[in-house]
Amino acid sequence: MPDDGVRVTPSELPTQPDGPRVQQVDALTAEAFAPAFEQLYARAFLQLHRRDGKRSAMSGASRAVLLHLAHTGPLTVGEAAKHLDRAQSVVSDIVTQLEQKGLLARESDPADRRRTLVWLTPDGRAALDRERSVLSADLVTAAADRLTPAERAVLLETLRRLVGADVPAPVPTLGGDPA
C-alpha cells in the first residue's frame, strides 16, 4: 500500500466500551487534516465501494414511494399521492407492484377501519437498505478484520464526532417491529 504521509497515532486505545478516549500524539492542524482526510477518504471509498453493478432494477418512482413511506410512516394511497404530487392512480399502480413484490403491505387503519394504509414490510426495509448502500459489506468486513476491536470502536467514535451525528435509529416496519 502506498505511503499516504499521514501518521496520527493514538496514545491510548480503549480496552473496554467505557475506556479512555483516544488522545492524539502527533499535532495535526485542522488545515493539514483537511487534505489528508480527503485523500484517505477517496482511497477508502475506491477500495470499499460496491462493485456489484446496478443496485437494483427498482424504478425511481418505486424508490420514491418506499423512501417516502420510510420517512412518514403508514399512509393511504391518496395521502402518498398528494405528498408525492402524483396522480392517485399512478401511485396506486406503484403500490400494487411493490405489494406484489412483497415490499409493501396494506393494513386497516386502527383509528378508522374504513381506511387502508400502505406500509413497508421487512423486505421493503431491506430493499431500501440495499438501495442506500454505497459500500460493499464484504469489503468493509475484510478491511475491519485488519483492525483490532478497540481500533474499530475508536474509528467509529471518531467518525461520529467528525460528522457530529449519532447513528440513526432503525425505521419501524409493518406491525411496528424494527427491521
Image (tube, grey):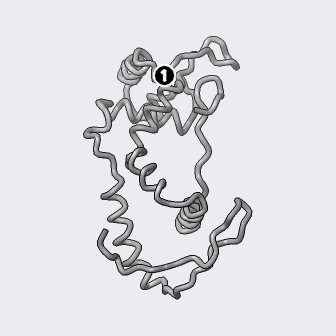
Residue at the spot x=39%, y=39% of the render?
A: 131
**Disc 1 residue crowd, few under 14, some 14–19, many 20+, Cα 10 Å:** many
Compared with 48, 38 (above or below) is below
Question: Which residue is identified by label 1?
Answer: 104
Tell me the quadrant of the picture where the N terminus can be found: bottom left
Residue lying at the far top in this picture: please name it: 114
Q: Position of residue 157 (x, y in %)?
A: 60, 63
Report which quarter residue 95 is drawn in.
top left
Query: In the image shown, does 28 or 60 lie closer to the viewer?
Result: 28
Q: Is residue 140 visible?
A: yes
Q: Position of residue 27 (x, y in %)?
A: 52, 88
- Asked which secondary structure carries label 1, the reply is strand
Tell me the quadrant of the picture where the C terminus can be found: top right
**How many numbered badges does the structure rendering display?**
1
Amino acid carrying label 1: it is Leu
Q: Position of residue 144 (x, y in %)?
A: 48, 55
Q: Is residue 165 visible?
A: no
Query: In the image shown, does 12 or 72 lie closer to the viewer?
Result: 12
Residue at the spot x=33%, y=76% of the render?
A: 3
Report which quarter residue 116 is drawn in.
top right
Compared with 47, 104 (above or below) is above
Query: In the image shown, does 44 or 150 lie closer to the viewer?
Result: 150
Residue at the spot x=37%, y=71% of the render?
A: 38
